Amino acid sequence: MKEFGMVVTGMGFVSPVGTQKADFFSWLRTGELSTEKAAECASIEPGSLVKHLGISDPKLKIARYMDPVSQNAIVALSGAMLDAGITDEDIAADPYRYGIVLGAARGACLTRDALYGSLESRRGKMVSGTLFSNCGHNIAGAMAAIAHGIKGLNITLAGRDDLGPSIMGRVTQFLVSNRVHTVFAGFTECGGTTSILSETACFLCIEEKGRAVGRGAAHMPQILLHRHASGLKASEGRAVFGFPDRDPAMTQGREIMKLPLPGMTAPVGHYSSVLMLGLLSCGEELGDRYASTAFAAGAGYNITIFRIVYDHAD
């Protein structure tokens, strides 16, 4: 078992619930919204989230056309930077030391649908290159990097399975290899279902622990990855456990939460571990009661234990 020192120093969200993490966490835990808010969320047309929320940012105009997944990613990344106390000037001073690891399922599906419709209407003749260039799964990561001047490692992971272990695995590789000192990790999604999570973007700012301490960041919990389940069984992989101390064997844990949470409805279960990292990184409620929490993600031999340590001042 090997542990890597990396801490969450900021979070950014955009969803039909809004851009405030407290509102998002409250909904994610309970699945409850007021009647008025639920009706408002249900009325949002796919791809119009940023407009609906009245978000105006010059960075959203860096391209003549931009798919909604890219818009959502830029807004969420801006929020994570603000929460972490990182500015565009900080990134410009050392742009190759910041990276992005982004998860996507459907990706830029609205633009692809528009492209297919254009092809059909033109009966196979030439279509707009602007549409085509925004169809890839990696377009959101690219646009987010351009918007903020990030020139370090930039990887998009796409798939229908739980992407959380893969995303965090790449984050760990990048930080441990010292190729970057800060990684913005998360997911962006737009379209496909009526679920609130069907159009949501989330970014966590994850830094090498020494870097965060050195710049005086008000960092949140430390993230420890355990590749092999020690103290948690694979069959318990959809439960969250709280631990009153720092026992490395992670025994004597008490089950405190079950996945999926109310807000995690199909087909978005594949971000469950990323969402749980964000949820647990809030840290305020659980951190008052537990020194750490842990949960398992993945399946078979790919089980990864995520342990979030709340009191890591040492």
Image (cartoon, rainbow, N blue to C red):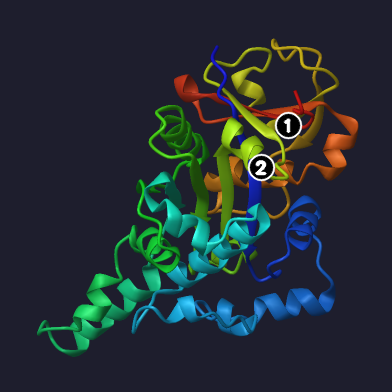
Residue 225 falls in which quadrant of the image?
A: top right
Position of 113 relative to 23 (above/below): below
Position of 54 relative to 73 (above/below): below
**Residue 266's x, y, as percent?**
57, 53
Image quarter where the C terminus lies is: top right
Question: Seen in the image, is 109 located left or right of residue 303?
Answer: left
Most extreme residue toward the right is: 289
Q: Name which residue lies at 56% across and 54% down.
A: 203
Residue 136 falls in which quadrant of the image?
A: bottom left
Inspect the image, locate mark 1, and give the three-letter code of the amino acid beneath it.
Val
Question: Label 1 vs label 2: CA separation?
Answer: 9 Å
Image quarter where the N terminus lies is: top right
- Look at the numbered disc 2 and give the secondary structure of its residue: helix
**Residue 135's x, y, as percent?**
29, 68
Q: Name which residue lies at 59% across and 58% down.
A: 81
Whether residue 264 can be seen here:
no
Question: Seen in the image, is 245 located left or right of residue 115?
Answer: right
Question: Which residue does the numbered mark 1 point to in the structure image?
Answer: 240
Q: Name which residue lies at 86% across and 21% down.
A: 244
> Which label belongs to residue 276?
2
**Residue 92's x, y, as percent?**
43, 59
**Residue 172's x, y, as percent?**
48, 31
Q: Are marks 1 and 2 in contact (CB under 8 Å)?
A: yes
Residue 294 falls in which quadrant of the image?
A: top right
- Look at the numbered disc 1 and give the secondary structure of its residue: strand
Position of 43 relative to 177 (above/below): below
- Looking at marks 1 and 2 on the same chain, the residue that comes earlier in the sequence is marked by 1
Inspect the image, locate mark 2, and give the three-letter code of the amino acid beneath it.
Met
